[in-house]
Image (cartoon, helix red, strand yellow):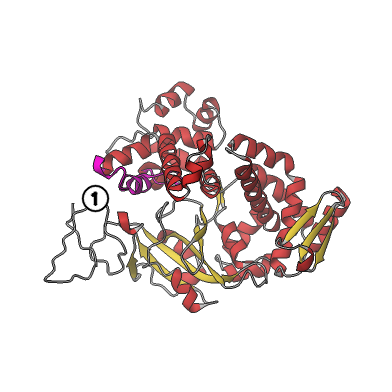
Amino acid sequence: MSAKLFLGHRLRRLRRDRDLSQTEMAKSLAISPSYLNHLERNQRPVTAGLLLKLAELYDIDVRAFAAGSGVHTGADALVEIFSDKILRDFGVPRFELAELANNAPTIADAIARLYTSVKEAERHPSAARAADARVLVTPENFVRDYIQQHRNHYPALEEAAETLGAALSDSLSMAGPMRRRLKDAWGITASVVPQSELGSVSQLYDADRRHFLISSQLRSENRLFALAYQLALVEFANVIDRMVAEARPPDEGIRQLLHISLADYAAGAIMMPYRRFLESAESYRYSIDRLCGEYGANVEQVAHRLTTLTRPGESGVPFFMLRVDPAGNISKRYAGENFPFSRFGGTCPRWNLHAAFQAAGQVVTQVIETPDGQRYFTVARTIERPIRTELATGLLAIGLGCDLRHAHKLSCADVYDLSRPRVTPVGPACAICPRMDCAYRATPPAGRMLAVDRTRKSISPYPFIPS
């Protein structure tokens, strides 16, 4: 490595994410705490040897760590923010935004939250007049940011769920053992009841009667997940309460949503205990259908679980995942490593995630390349909604992807010549996408001078002058 790497803020973030003191991390790296302090303050560069040791001990991607890509607010997100009309006239160059994202990631996260609040204020003017500005922090964005700050992996929940999941293991189904555990350990009776008894909810815990009610219209995999969810709420109450308190949600609604999200995570970990699931995933070469059969789970549950396999020293393929509806609304967004799409906008129309709706039930694969030259292998397929009611009709689509260098581990990539795959160029949201000759461009690129000419029409509806 010829260039000096000053990675202080990333190193500090890594240490804090692992809940380590400077003394503890320094000891693991066989360096002095004072030297680590100099590294974190960018007074010393990170050497190649130390970078490799970090990769070995903390299971990080050296390239991503050194380049500054990751799960926190990155340069692409800041470029998207500063391309907005309220900031565009500053003309902040990309290299300055990259420096901010790399050297002050907490400030970058704060800018992203502030920008999100501004956009919410535009959508909900009445909320913007509220005395407490925290109402502009949307629940879904707060929870998404929290999840990504933890790389969608929670060691305390994983360890507890792995112990419990092993105790509940059954060759036929975990449903019976989970119901008995609820009854014997917690005095909770679980029953399946007609949807008419539940109104607009799919599951309900009656604390007075200690009765857990599950809708008969839930699909079998979702009934199993419901049992695991209720078990997580009672078994891991102290752990989840502590995690929610440490996150400091700004209001009760966000607090409840984060609690649900963590309990959902724990439910998946109970159904699919970490070590056994990772071994199965590698044995089945990440075949989603075979994993569904092995664990009695559905496609979405398995896909979500695949994004959580980032345990240091025991990691799987680092996947990212999206869930969208036919209108393109993104309702889930997870990443075990980095995420190649726009944080604030939608997905690129050239990514075939939306094509899955025209091939319902089929696996649609694609190799994509982002403007920075990174290539990803992606899988898209439709899923049914978890409950059968007149109000929950239609399909959703799941998009799952990983860096192309991991694709050889996936059975669905066997049909590709991965040394020379057919690649589809994609980009972030159209407003910040730098690709010029794109017939799919829906909006002009922010901050670029258009190169339109009434005497001719180009392939792209909004040709622009390159910077």
Q: Residue at x 23, y 63 (%)?
A: 462
Q: Residue placed farthest to the left in the image? A: 455
Q: Residue at x 22, y 71 (%)?
A: 459
Q: Is residue 154 left or right of residue 77?
A: right
Q: Is residue 325 left or right of residue 186?
A: left
Q: Where is residue 206 in the image (x, y as percent from the top left)?
A: 81, 53
Q: Does the magenta stretch include residue 91?
A: yes
State the extent of the magenta-drawn residues as a range. 68-93
Name the outermost residue toward the top: 34
Q: What residue type is labelled 1?
A: Gly
Q: Nearer the viewer, residue 388 or 239?
A: 388
> Where 6 sits versus 179, above or below?
above
The residue located at (31%, 54%) in the rendering is 432
Crowd band around label 1 with a 10 angstrom C-alpha radius: few (<14), some (14–19), many (20+): some
Q: How far from the left and from the top, in percent, is residue 109?
A: 44, 39
Is residue 463 a member of the stretch shown in magenta?
A: no
Q: For this rendering, which residue is in front, 372 or 324?
A: 324
Residue depicted at x 45% and y 45%: 121
User: In screen coordinates, is 375 left or right of 362?
Assistant: left
Q: Quadrant of the N terminus?
A: top left
**Would residue 414 be seen by someone viewing this image from the given angle?**
no
Residue toward you, 116 or 313:
116
Task: Quickly name the residue at label 1.
Answer: 447
Element marked by disc 1: loop
Image quadrant assignment for residue 435: bottom left
Residue 198 against residue 187 in the figure, above or below: below
Instruction: Using the image, determine if residue 131 lies above or below residue 336.
Output: above
Percent across and percent down for residue 199 are 74, 63
Residue 168 visible in image? yes
